[in-house]
Amino acid sequence: MALILKDRFRALFKPYNLALLFLFLIFNAQSMYLIQMRSSVNSNFLPILHFAKNPAAFQNDIMYQCTQFLFTLYYIIPGLLAHYLSNDVIIYATLLLQNSLIFICLYWLAQELFDDRLTSVLSIIIVVFYGVTRFSLGSDVVFGANLFPGLFAIPLLLLAISFFLEDRFLLAGLITGLMFNFHGSHSLFVIVMFSVYFLFNFRSVGLVTIVKSLCLFALGALPLVLIILLSRQPATGQLPFKEWLIHMYIRRGHHCFPSMFVIKAKLFFTLTMLPIVFSYIFNDRLETEKRKKLFYLAGGVLLLFVIGTVFTELIPVAPIINLTLFRSSRFLVLVGIIIFADYFARVYQGENQAASLAVLLIVFTFFSQNQFILMVPALIYLVFYELNRKFKWLTEKKYYHWLILFLLVAVFETGVILLKDLFPVLTLLQRNPTGLYLALLSMALFFASDSVKVFLPYKNQFKAVFLILFLVVSVLYVSYPRPPLAYDPSWLEVQRWINLNAPADKLVITPPYKRGFRSYGGRGIILTWFDSDDMAYVPHLGQEIMSRLKDLGFSYRNLKSASWYTCLRLLQNSYNRFNENYFRYLAGKYDCGLLIVERSKTLAFPMLYFNDDYAVYLVR
């Protein structure tokens, strides 16, 4: 036993394992730093911990009523542990579990596809750095400083996909069914992807195997299905469908309706898919049978796109709208990044250094978010490189390849500079590239160490220096823990003061355009604009949610032409016009004790607390 432990301890210090351990520690430190400041991203998780500890404080809070119908087992264990452990311990343990699962399951899937440790490590590096951005259509991050049910389910659904690729269809179906209990829509995405493969290959797979796999899925999903059926509520409190649809179009349009996806999201997703499709076509190491399975899995995602377009935009159907089918694209991107990472590893280990730099350029366009235009010349060069490998059009002299690559980059960069005034959308593809170019320069010097005479006497030492420089610049450029865009220290200070000083049995009147108060405030509130999202999941409370929203200043005037941000501005203007009499009306109707307003607004109530941006008043 001692020898086994000794060998495993030594294995930790192998280069690939050290790289993964370093990356894991850095990423978890960053996630835990950010999550302390993000009340918005914990808008369900933390309040549920508060609900479990002190339900009396939230009895009149509409979100407390909504959480009774959040059909996921994700919150049950943290809710039970809340009676024994501090919130911070539960948050960090959950975050550590989620991040560990994505590392483990992504590595497992990459090993199943290519059985190459370098590919597995590169896949994780790309997903970690790229995953902090918008990862796919209609969705947010895959993991990181977030506590949502989907972020727990995604890694284990990737594990199900890896078993599917091994022809272990029964186990894949069972895991997918079990994940239905944590995130139903993501689980449905994956079983649809599997079903498309089954449909076109039922003879080779076998009808009995297909039926068993689908039955195991149903068996695994049964606990949550029973909960949903037993929790059905009468439709008496629902909004009329047309009114509900208009509200969903504005509040959740950026998640559910393709026509509402911002141009930046569509552009980035398209440019992300380009190298993935390219590497799928040209990656020789992808086995034929696995290539076939991945083709049908991608077909399943395409089918979900079609259904998600038809039954949201053309023939709106509430359950389809709520499923946000375009979020299935995240599985396409995750698997695709592994394929690209393997192509990167193959080219990196080859002799053509210009091709190595081209694939590196593509990786950094993933990282940099707004330098996607550099991907286009790199991909054009790689297409030429692959065709030249086959047809031998050009001599193997290296400087020809360098010349072609840099000419393509120069042409495209110059084109953007000249055309961005005519086509403003091109400005989405630009960002201060200093860190990007420093990282690329260090990696170019790393490659040059093998051939430049100046470096040859101390080749290994120079390569080590350039590699360290590359890693340092990459970490600083990509994952330096910056405060999130929504970070508002004054808002967090108010929440913490309320948590320590406000009566526990009364609601607090808060600005409806500010999110996340319950996370650190620990008290119930009337409503925020963001809570109206719950109408998608608890339609029987739709009328009550809309009534509270109107009491806080919301109006349907010009709603069809309004946007998500327009509604926030409308609520802010309305709320800031309320006088003492109206605040008394709200306090009496909803049993509120304290009131929070912007510091610039003065009221004839006793002021209990203030900071730079907000003030707390006692309503009487």
Image (cartoon, grey):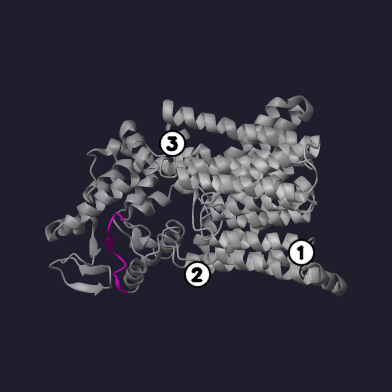
Residue 262 seen in the current view = no
Task: Kindly give the residue lying farthest to the right in the view shown.
Answer: 3
Report, in whole angstroms, how far the alpha carbon at label 2 lies from the one at label 3.
36 Å
Residue 330 as seen in the image, left or right of residue 462: left
Give x and y (percent) for residue 10. 81, 71
CA neighbours of label 3 inside 10 A, class few (<14), some (14 to 19), many (20+): many
Contact between labelled residues 2 and 1, with CB atoms less than 8 Å apart: no
Residue 171 position (above or below residue 299): below
Which element type, helix, strand or loop, lies under badge 3?
loop
Q: Secondary structure at mark 2?
A: helix
Magenta-drawn segment: 501-513
Q: Residues within 10 Å of mark 1 (few under 14, many from 20)?
A: many
Provide residue 513's location: percent of width, then percent of height: 30, 54
Image point 39% across, 65% down: which residue?
54
Secondary structure under the numbered disc 1 in the rendered image? loop
Q: Alpha carbon of mark 3 to alpha carbon of mark 1: how far?
A: 51 Å
- Residue pointed to by mark 1: 449
In the rendered structure, find residue 257 and report the number of the disc placed on it: 3
Mark 1 or 2: the one toward you:
1
Q: Nearer the viewer, residue 21 or 494?
A: 21
Q: What amino acid is at disc 1?
A: Ser
Quarter holding the C terminus is bottom left
Q: Nearer the viewer, residue 171 or 482?
A: 482
The residue located at (36%, 71%) in the rendering is 496
Residue depicted at x 33% and y 36%: 246
Q: Quadrant of the N terminus?
A: bottom right
Disc nearer the start of the sequence (1/2): 2
* Amino acid beneath label 2: Asp
Earlier sequence position, callout 2 versus callout 3:
2
Direction from residue 571 to residue 7 in the image, left or right: right
Disc 2 target residue: 88
